[in-house]
């Protein structure tokens, strides 16, 4: 798995969580040949004088054995770990749909 961080330096905790989540996709190993994770820090525009909020956008691109790329929905959250878990959950659902 390749991990790319945009807008922030990333962290060992995010990498560890991604590794744990990747293990859950192991059951699709005969179908998958790779996975690219991008976690981007996005600054929200302030609304009505509220301070600028920071959101994290986690997204996965799955590479299947035919070298086709499957993009998974973007998952936004104020906590990068929650966004990452949601992205992996979405990837798991997408793969289950494709195989059934």
Image: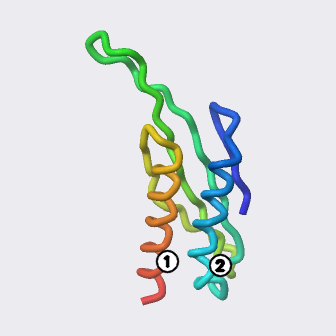
Q: Secondary structure at mark 2?
A: strand
Rendered view: 49 above or below 43: above
Residues at circles 2 and 1 in contact by the CB criterion of under 8 Å: yes
- Residue 53 image position (x, y, % from top left): 42, 25
Q: Earlier in the sequence, mark 2 or mark 1?
A: 2
Kindly give the residue lying farthest to the left in the view shown. 48
Say which residue label 1 marks. 95
Residue displayed at 40% across by 21% down? 45
Query: Disc number at residue 54?
Result: none
Work out how far the residue at label 2 is from the one at label 1, CA to CA, in angstroms: 9 Å
Q: Quadrant of residue 23?
A: bottom right
* Color theme of the render: rainbow
Q: Quadrant of the N terminus?
A: bottom right
Say which residue label 2 marks. 32
Q: How busy is the neighbourhood of tag 2: few (under 14 within 10 Å), some, or many (20 plus)? A: some
- Residue 76 image position (x, y, % from top left): 43, 45
Residue displayed at 48% across by 26% down? 43
């Amino acid at each position: 798995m390749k991990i790319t961080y945009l807008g922030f330096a990333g962290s060992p905790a995010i990498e560890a969580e991604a590794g744990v989540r990747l293990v859950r996709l192991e059951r699709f190993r005969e179908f998958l040949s790779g996975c690219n994770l991008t976690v981007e820090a996005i600054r929200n525009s302030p609304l009505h004088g509220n301070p600028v909020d920071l959101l994290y956008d986690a997204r996965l691109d799955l590479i299947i054995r035919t070298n086709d790329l499957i993009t998974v929905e973007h998952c936004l959250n104020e906590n990068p770990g929650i966004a990452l878990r949601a992205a992996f959950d979405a990837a798991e659902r997408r793969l289950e749909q494709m195989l059934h």
